[in-house]
Image (cartoon, grey):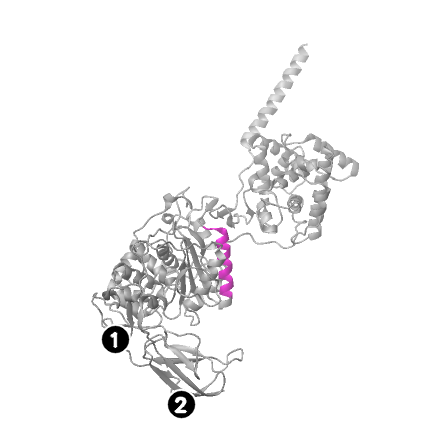
């Protein structure tokens, strides 16, 4: 009796000591359950825009069961660990089965590792395969089961499972092999993702397609066999499928016929500039959510890359699409190709100040409408003029004479715009911009002059989109937001970026203003191939892309009536030939020296801005706002996937009036408000080709005759041209027009102006 008592006590003490040792080991050596994960940047709807590899170069995306097709989870459990939901980390029956197969066959037929044991091997990878290693896995599996729920164990396994190369986890694998998140998978796709982690390098589809296919087939067959062995289903009612969510023989046949991708895709790398900004501004969070819409972003990035390729080397494209009502940026393209060093693709050109060309003219007209100086049909002069020595010229070096305000803005005439700016005041325009949250850049110590109306000022693409959003939003401006907190960022100093030097503003602008308008911002002093680092947010702080509380209302840019009138005019500008039809109001601009081509357009809700140029500020004579940027603008609206939104109804005070309905003081513009006297134009005169000229007919690249440019001076627009008595297709307000002769010999050219006056020349056309 005494011996039995001593034996019992010894046994109890031994077990207690073992338990204490186990608890001590568990406390002192907990399993590492917080692996380093890839940082993710998500769009406004939670879709992945870009992921960043971990420090060890792994693509390891956190995965939850909600991220994965339920059939994959059921297939994984059925294939790897059928009693997963009932055991506590170790499955004795599976171990006995594996040992028996080893004795019977002399080799390992099936492993006895549970998913918990496999997870233990993943969190502590060791090269050796020994009994000691297996015992260590079993101990770790017990620890894992004590700390995590079954759901959490599955999620951690699905996050860490190896898929070959630097791919870890089912999300990274699904994106790399199928180009999609694993929320919805086919049976064949799910089976492949179950099979690969067993031998990830040997079964990689890009290196061993037959091996990958064979592994997938084994999973499909074994899962179906296990299902039928347990449920013995009637295949007509498919009880196995209904009970487990698994597959039957017919599903296997269909899945086996499905092809396996043989090439690995790159993981999403959308919005590279904005994603980098978010991570640099606040490195702490693993997930950053921005205001972008993935569908919009994909469309704009694809368009920018294709358009830049067709335009030529070193040219880049930047685009910003925003919601005018909320200020949310839905699409952001900083360059055509972030990874193209030859075009400085890593520089975010949406934030670099450049000369905006003629894109500020709508705001000049808006102030004039607001002040009651003009209406759409008011006549204004487009003739040579001097403003205290400042002599602006039009792009084509010609003048239209008397034009309506509508025509002057639609044709982007420079002299009428400067006449209006001189009346409303350049300083007042700059104040409006500042109150609307936009700081236009002028040389230090210089006051704003008239040249700002033609591009003699520095603005970013974001600035322009914010200003045009005010036009789309009935004059009300909200600050643009991208989800990265503004106060957490330190803007890259201009000296580190390629800047602008638009001498004297707009193309065709000659002479100087009363205040010097030479603007030079930045240079190419920054030679690094990596963008400068930004400031960092306090820990835990990050952008919030949703919620009206984040809207920051600013002072009105224009009155609703003035904003509507500008939209009424700009919506009448014809789109470039061949562009998709879209009911938008838009304006183009080209900076001095052909360095920047712009186009900004909007409908009743969305604003899109496009910039085309070189990041090193070099001139590109072939680009203009209308010919280069405007087609991209219209294509961008089409690619965005956003439905057109009609313009709002005219607000109070906004009306369309014919010229004869206007008060006498508004029929012709006069800066002092007095009734202006009409000017008498000289009769039209054809200056090229002159009378009796012999003109050699050149051929274009296709061998067809090249058009001949006809030029005139004087007269009152519009003009009707006739060649050999036959009218050319459309009357024109410009004093240049293209004509393609139908052959060699004498031709008679005639032009008739709006007053009925005509001029005629006879020329000899030779081939």
Q: Is residue 117 above or below residue 61?
A: above
Dot 1: element:
loop
> Mark 1: few, some, or many residues within 10 Å (few <14, many ≥20)?
few
> Mark 2: few, some, or many residues within 10 Å (few <14, many ≥20)?
few
Nearest the eye: 180 or 54: 180
Dot 2: element:
loop
Residue at image coords 28%, 66% = 660
Nearest the eye: 730 or 478: 730
In the rendering, which numbered label is found on residue 711? none
Distance from Cα at disc 1 to Cα at disc 2: 32 Å
Residue at mark 2? 692
Nearest the eye: 195 or 318: 318
**Looking at the image, is mark 1 or mark 2 earlier in the sequence?**
1
Q: Is residue 3 above or below residue 748?
A: above
Q: Would residue 555 be seen by someone viewing this image from the given angle? A: yes
296 drawn magenta: yes
Image-quadrant location for residue 373:
bottom left
Q: Would residue 449 be seen by someone viewing this image from the given angle? A: no
Q: Main secondary structure of the magenta part?
A: helix
In the rendering, which numbered label is found on residue 679? 1
Image depth: mark 1 or mark 2 in front: 1
Image-quadrant location for residue 408:
bottom left
Residue 170 percent location from the top left of the image = 59, 44
Image-quadrant location for residue 22:
top right
The tally of labels here is 2
The segment highlighted magenta reads: 292-309
- As drawn, the residue found furthest toward the front would be 661
- As drawn, the residue found furthest toward the top would be 1
């Amino acid at each position: 009796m005494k011996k039995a008592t001593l034996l019992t006590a010894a046994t109890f003490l031994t077990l207690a000591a073992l338990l204490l040792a186990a608890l001590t080991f568990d406390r002192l050596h907990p399993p590492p359950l917080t692996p380093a994960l890839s940082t993710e940047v998500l769009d406004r709807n939670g879709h992945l825009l870009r992921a960043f590899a971990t420090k060890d170069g792994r693509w390891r995306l956190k995965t939850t069961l909600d991220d994965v097709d339920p059939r994959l989870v059921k297939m994984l459990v059925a294939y790897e660990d059928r009693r997963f939901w009932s055991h506590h980390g170790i499955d004795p029956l599976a171990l006995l089965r594996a040992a028996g197969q080893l004795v019977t066959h002399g080799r390992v037929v099936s492993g006895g590792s549970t998913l918990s044991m496999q997870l233990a091997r993943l969190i502590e990878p060791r090269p050796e395969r020994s009994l000691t290693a297996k015992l260590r896995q079993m101990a770790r599996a017990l620890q894992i089961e004590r700390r995590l729920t079954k759901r959490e164990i599955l999620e951690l396994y699905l996050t860490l499972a190896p898929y070959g190369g630097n791919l870890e986890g089912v999300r990274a694998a699904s994106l790399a092999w199928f180009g999609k998140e694993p929320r919805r998978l086919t049976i064949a796709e799910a089976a492949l993702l179950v099979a690969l982690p067993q031998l990830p390098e040997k079964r990689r589809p890009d290196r061993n397609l037959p091996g990958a296919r064979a592994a997938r087939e084994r999973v499909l067959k074994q899962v179906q066999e296990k299902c039928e062995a347990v449920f013995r289903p009637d295949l007509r009612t498919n009880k196995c499928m209904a009970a487990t969510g698994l597959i039957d023989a017919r599903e296997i046949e269909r899945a086996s016929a499905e092809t396996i991708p043989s090439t690995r895709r790159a993981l999403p790398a959308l919005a590279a500039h904005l994603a980098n900004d978010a991570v640099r501004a606040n490195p702490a969070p693993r997930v950053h959510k921005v205001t972008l819409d993935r569908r919009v972003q994909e469309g704009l990035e694809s368009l920018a890359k294709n358009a830049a390729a067709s335009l030529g080397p070193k040219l880049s494209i930047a685009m910003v699409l925003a919601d005018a009502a909320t200020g949310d940026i839905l699409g952001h393209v900083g360059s055509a190709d972030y990874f193209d060093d030859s075009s400085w693709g890593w520089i975010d050109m949406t934030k670099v100040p450049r000369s905006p060309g003629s894109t500020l003219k709508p705001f000049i007209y808006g102030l004039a409408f607001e002040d009651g100086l003009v209406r759409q049909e008011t006549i204004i002069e487009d003739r040579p003029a001097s403003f205290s020595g400042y002599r602006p010229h039009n792009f084509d070096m010609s003048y239209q004479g008397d034009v309506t305000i509508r025509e002057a803005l639609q044709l982007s005439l420079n002299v009428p715009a400067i006449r209006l700016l001189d009346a409303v005041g350049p300083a007042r325009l700059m104040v409006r911009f500042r109150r609307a949250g936009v700081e236009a850049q002028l040389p230090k110590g210089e006051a704003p002059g008239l040249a700002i109306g033609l591009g003699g000022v520095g603005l970013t693409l974001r600035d322009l989109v914010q200003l045009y959003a005010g036009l789309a939003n009935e004059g009300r401006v909200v600050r643009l937001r991208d989800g990265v907190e503004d106060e957490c960022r330190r803007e890259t100093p201009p000296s580190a970026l390629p800047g602008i030097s638009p001498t004297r503003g707009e193309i065709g602008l000659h002479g100087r203003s009363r205040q010097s308008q030479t603007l030079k911002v930045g240079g190419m002093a920054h030679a690094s191939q990596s963008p400068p680092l930004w400031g960092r947010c306090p820990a835990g702080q990050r952008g919030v892309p949703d919620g009206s509380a984040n809207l920051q209302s600013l002072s009105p840019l224009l009155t609703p009536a003035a904003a509507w009138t500008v939209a009424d005019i700009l919506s009448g500008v014809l789109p470039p030939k061949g562009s998709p039809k879209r009911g938008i109001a838009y304006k183009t601009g080209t900076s001095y020296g052909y360095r920047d081509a712009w186009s900004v357009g909007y409908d009743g809700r969305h604003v899109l801005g496009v910039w085309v140029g070189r990041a090193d500020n070099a001139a590109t004579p072939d680009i203009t706002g209308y010919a280069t940027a405007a087609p991209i603008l219209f294509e961008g609206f089409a690619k965005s996937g956003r439905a057109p939104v009609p313009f709002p109804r005219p607000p109070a005070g906004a009306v369309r009036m014919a010229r004869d309905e206007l008060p006498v003081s508004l029929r012709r513009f006069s800066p002092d408000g007095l009734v202006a006297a009409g000017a008498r134009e000289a009769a039209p005169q054809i200056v090229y080709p002159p009378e009796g000229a012999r003109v050699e007919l050149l051929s274009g690249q296709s061998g067809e005759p090249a058009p001949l440019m006809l030029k005139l001076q004087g007269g009152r627009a519009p003009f009707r041209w006739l060649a050999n008595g036959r009218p050319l297709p459309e009357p024109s307000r410009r004093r240049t027009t293209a004509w393609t002769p139908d052959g060699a010999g004498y031709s008679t050219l005639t032009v008739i102006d709006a007053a009925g006056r005509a001029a005629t020349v006879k020329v000899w056309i030779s081939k």
